[in-house]
Amino acid sequence: MKKALIFLILVMISCNSTKEISNLEKEKITSELDYIFNIDQKYSTGTPSEDLFKKFEKKEAWKIFEMKRDSVGLDNQKKIKKLYSEYGYFGYDKIGKEYSKKFWITIQHADNDIKFQQKMLKELGKEIEKNNAEKSNYAMLEDRISINLNQKQRFGSQVTYNKVGQAIPKNGLLDSLNVDNLRIKYNLPPFKEYYNWMTTSHFEMNKDYFLKQGMKEPKLY
């Protein structure tokens, strides 16, 4: 009886992962993924509003903003996990390239749930083998998990900055000599190009600070 129940559960999971999505369902899913993506970007790449800075001191404003960001992240994760349980991983064939990425972004930012990230990495890997998902998403998620486990990265997609504002690989690289070969295979830009772009972006975002330090331009590779 117990074995039969386990078999039935596995069959149900398998059916969900290959479930045909109707046009009506797809409209609802894409609408939800649009919301998830937009609010994720608002808080993962944004800054506190001017009104927040007016009402609170800078430190307190950032604390409130970060609490809201964490709350948004957890809410998004619940939505993504529910979608996954119902439909499986969203590759191109189910939802298209744009929405496959929008599904992935919350997984990428789910740093509080490494086991979930690891599970999704395996599922994403299966889609990559079928040319049904973006290789760069796999590379970035693998690196993200490595950082969350305090390990070195394979692809160098996750950066931090040294004292002069130059982008450097967070936790270092597993194989710095072959990193560009790996990046090419996974549709990532060359290491130097990417790190110069990140360095320049960081400089522009913190230009007043760097000018006060006597730096008139970013320190590129």
Image (tube, grey):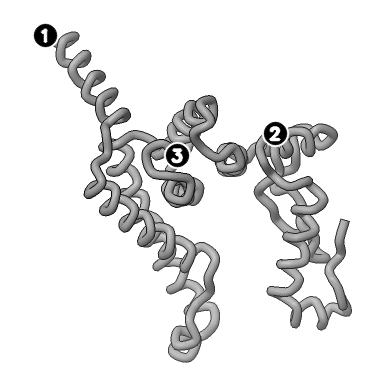
In terms of secondary structure, where does tag 1 sit? loop
Query: How many angstroms separate mark 1 from mark 2 (CA)?
Result: 48 Å
User: Most extreme residue toward the bottom, as rendered?
Assistant: 54
- Residue type marked 1: Met
The circle on residue 1 is 1
Q: Is residue 111 visible?
A: no
The answer to whether residue 8 is left or right of residue 129 is left
What residue is drawn where x is 66% and y is 49%? 158
Residue under label 3: 92
Above or below 137: residue 182: above
In terms of secondary structure, where does tag 3 sit? helix
* Residue neighbourhood size for the residue with mark 3, other residues' Cα within 10 Å, grouped as few (<14), some (14–19), many (≥20): some
Q: Position of residue 23 (x, y in %)?
A: 25, 46
* Residue neighbourhood size for the residue with mark 1, other residues' Cα within 10 Å, grouped as few (<14), some (14–19), many (≥20): few
| Relative depth, front residue between 144 and 12 | 12
Residue under label 2: 185
Of label 1 and label 3, which has the lower sequence position? 1
| Relative depth, front residue between 193 and 92 | 92
The answer to whether residue 141 is left or right of residue 82 is right
Q: Position of residue 144 (x, y in %)?
A: 58, 43
Above or below 7: residue 140: below
Q: Is residue 86 visible?
A: yes
Of label 1 and label 2, which has the lower sequence position? 1
- Residue type marked 3: Tyr
Q: Position of residue 146 (x, y in %)?
A: 60, 38
Of label 3 and label 2, which has the lower sequence position? 3
User: Most extreme residue toward the left, as rendered?
Assistant: 1
Closest to the camera, between mark 1 and mark 3, is 3
Q: Position of residue 113 (x, y in %)?
A: 43, 43
Mark 1 touches mark 3? (CB < 8 Å): no
What residue is drawn where x is 45% and y is 30%? 123
